[in-house]
Image: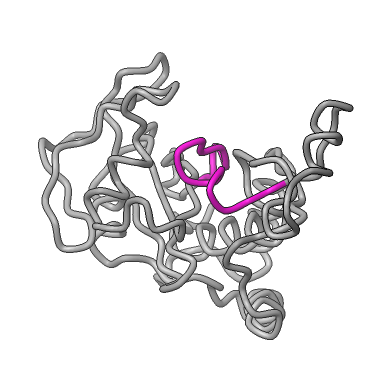
Amino acid sequence: MSSAGPDWATLEGNFEKNFAALTFVEATKVHTEPKQDYVAAALEAFKTSGEAPLRMDPDSLTSFTQGIAGNTFTAVVDIVERMIYMCPLASTREGNVAYPHERATVGGKSTAPFVHEGGGANPGHEQLAILIEKSGQNRLVGFSVTKKDNGSGWVESLVSRSQNNAIFRKKPQTVHEQMADMMKPPDQKGVPSQVPSEVWAKLIVKSVVVHLPGQAN
């Protein structure tokens, strides 16, 4: 983290603001649950020293640094490697700012900014999973990051149908979901969730505010 970046107290404040703006669901079951001792240690490290709980792919960090305010990045964290990967999105949505370069590098691979097509057609998270050769392995948590005016990263969304549904499950809400859940074997109970559990939401946001702190005000 650059010496010109915010101090630890500011990072903690940035986390609180970002986390409060997000919507998440506490999952009842995670296929690959992080070890409890790791989670506790990671969250405590942030609390006491501002250390990031998750690592950041160096190429993704460079691509983010080379971007400009308003750029949106599709992002995933590999829950086995505990590594965050990010790729810029093309400005295909209202409010998105075009990435200022024709190419970006992610995990050692060069790519054009992704064109995100939601609704299952060609989602950015799946494009990223394919690029880093981890598609279909049920080990990625998808989210998105926006670059702010001061150069910092802001977790814009934790929603990912293509990735999170395969890992996270929430309690059934409707009567139909509850009845269907009763018929499932123990390892398949719960309703697929497009957003991660609270603990993974915290790990992601804490890591983003540390790795992408921007400039101190």
Q: For the view shown, which residue lies furthest in the top direction?
A: 94
Q: Tell me: 4 left or right of 102.
A: right
Q: For the view shown, which residue lies furthest in the right direction?
A: 175
Whether the magenta-drawn stretch holds residue 167 is answered as yes
Instruction: Locate residue 125, reporting x and y percent.
Output: 38, 41
- Residue at 42% of width from left, 18% of height from top? 95
Q: Tell me: 20 left or right of 106.
A: right
- Which image quarter holds the N terminus? bottom left
Instruction: Locate residue 78, reporting x and y percent.
Output: 43, 63
In depth, the one of 125 and 137 nearer the eye is 137
Instruction: Locate residue 204, reporting x and y percent.
Output: 56, 58
- Residue at 75% of width from left, 59% of height from top? 186
- Residue at 22% of width from left, 55% of height from top? 106
Q: Which residues are magenta?
A: 154-169
Residue 177, picture quadrant: top right
Q: Tell me: 170 left or right of 146.
A: right
Instruction: Locate residue 217, reporting x and y percent.
Output: 54, 52
In depth, the one of 169 and 204 nearer the eye is 169
Residue 71, picture quadrant: top left
Whether the magenta-drawn stretch holds residue 125 is answered as no
In depth, the one of 162 and 153 nearer the eye is 162
Q: Tell me: 112 left or right of 167.
A: left
**Vertical relation: 4 (above or below) 170:** below
**Vertical relation: 50 (above or below) 22:** below
In depth, the one of 40 and 70 nearer the eye is 40
